[in-house]
Image (cartoon, rainbow, N blue to C red):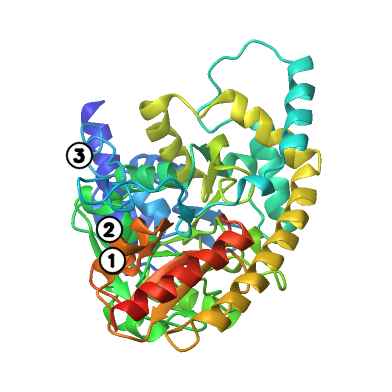
Amino acid sequence: MGTNLAKYEKVMNYIKKAISSGDWPIGSKIPSQRKLAELLSVNRSTIVTALEELKAEGLIEGVMGKGTMVVNNTWTLLAASPPSWDESAPLSFPKSVPSPVLETDEIKAPDHLIELSKGELAQDIFPKDNMQQVMMRLAQSLEPFGYEEPKGYLPLRQAISDYMKKQGTNVSPDSILIVSGAIQGLQLIAAGLLHKGSTVFLEKPSYLYSLHIFQSAGMNLSGLPMDEEGLQPAPLAKKAMDGPSSILYTIPCFHNPTGILMSEARRKELLDICAEKRLPIIEDDIYRELWIDSPPPPTLQSLDSNGHVLYIGSFSKTLTPGLRIGWIAGAEPVIDRLAEMKKQTDYGSSSLSQLVAAEWISSGLYEQHLSFVREELKKRRTAALNVLNQYMSDLAEWDVPAGGFLIWLRIKKNVQLKDMHQKAYKAGISLNMGSIYTEESVQAIRLSYGYASIEEFEQGIIKLREIILEDN
C-alpha cells in the first residue's frame, strides 16, 4: 500500500510541477493515461488514481469531447501544495496602526479628540433601531448554540452567495468561508496557502503596510505605483515573475488610503497580466458598497474566468465592525483548505454574529441601510470638500473620492509631519500620517470624513491649517 501511495503521489507531483512551471497552461489538454503511464513507468491504475485526486483538488477536469484539461494554476495549485511549515507556525497578528502620540509628561491626552483618522462610520450612522429589531426577532426563535460547520453558518453563506450573484459574481455557498473580519482572512491566506520567500505585490501606499501579517510569515512586500485609474499595470508586468512564488494584493474599490476607484479597463488589464504571469490575486473589496456617485465596476473575481482571484468581503465598514463578520470567496478546494486552517484557529466565527448578519442580508434590511449610508456619506463628502477648498487649497492637494470615506491629503509645503502629528494631538486632533501606509516618509495624511461630525471635521481642518502655517 505504501509503495502504491508513493507512486501515485509521484505522478501527482509531476503533473503539479508541469502546471506550476507553465509547461501545461490553463486550457491545455494533458497527455493520455497511456502516455503518462509510459512516461512515468507506472501502470494505468496508478495514473487513474492520481488524476482523480487532482480533479478533486480542482486542478484538472474532464471536458466532454476534449479529454482532461488544466483548469487552474494559481490558488488551487497553492491549496494542493500547502506550505510544509504551517501546522506549527502560529498565525501572525497585525501590529496596530500607530496611535496618536501616547501621553507623556510633556504631552497630556486631550479631553476630547476630533477623530480624523478613524476608518469606520460614525456612531449616528449605526442602525441602532433596525439592529434592535433584528436581535428581538432572533431572540424569539433562538436555540442553543453549537459550533458551526467549518465554513460557517450555511444560511449566511447562502445569503452572501445570493448577494454576490446580484453583483455579478457567481459563487456557491460551498465556495464561501465566513471569517472574523477581513484581517483574519488575510492571516489564514498567509499561513495556509503562501510559502516563505513569496513576494506580495500591492499598491503603494496601501493599508497592508500598516499590518505585518505577510512579513511575519516570511514574505516580502513590493509596492507598485498608482494613477487615477488604480494600480499601474506596466510596473507589475515588469516585476512579476512567472509562477506561484508571488501574489497580488489589491483594494480596487475606494482604496485605503487614497480613495482611488480602479476603472473597469484597468481591472481587465491587471487580470490579463496575472493570467499571463500565473499570479494569484487577493481582491480586498470591503469598501465596495460605500459608493456615492454610481456603483463601481464589476469585481475582479466576476471578470476572472481562471480562478485566479480570492475575494474578501466584510460588514465592518458598512454595518458595524463589532459584528466581526467577513468572508472569503474562491475556488472550492481553496476554501476547503482555508476552512481547515480556521478550524485549527478558533473553531468558527461567533454563531450569534453569523445569525445577525444572515438576518440583515436575507431580510433586505442591509440594502435599505446601504442606501441610507450612501446618502450620509454624500453629505459628509460635500461638507468635507467645501472645508478643504476653503482652508487647504493653498497648502495641499487631494482627489475627490467617488465613494468610501477617505481622502489622501498631499501636503504641498515641506512640513515635519512627526512634529505636526504631535501638535495636532495636543490640539485634540487624531490624524494618520501617510508613512503608516508606505513604510517610508511621505508628505501626506489620510483623512477620514466618515467618523467625525461635519462640524468637528471643519474644526479639525481649521486647526490643522494653523499648525501647518506655524511651521512655515
- Please report whichever mark, 3 or 2, sits nearer to the chain's N-terminal start: 2
- Residue 349 appears at what percent x and percent y? 51, 29
Tell me if residue 347 comes above or below residue 54 in the rendering.
above
Q: CA distance from mark 3 to mark 2?
A: 20 Å
- Helix, strand or loop status at disc 2: helix
Residue at left offset 48%, top offset 55%: 115
Q: On the rendered structure, is 203 left or right of 4? A: right
- Helix, strand or loop status at disc 1: loop
Task: Quadrant for the N terminus, please.
Answer: top left
Residue located beneath label 1 in the image = 21
| 118 or 57: nearer the viewer | 118
From the viewer's perspective, is the residue at label 3 or at label 1 nearer? 3
Q: Amino acid at mark 2?
A: Lys
Q: Residue furthest bottom?
A: 394
Q: CA distance from mark 2 to mark 1?
A: 6 Å
| 179 or 353: nearer the viewer | 353
Task: Quadrant for the C terminus, please.
Answer: bottom left
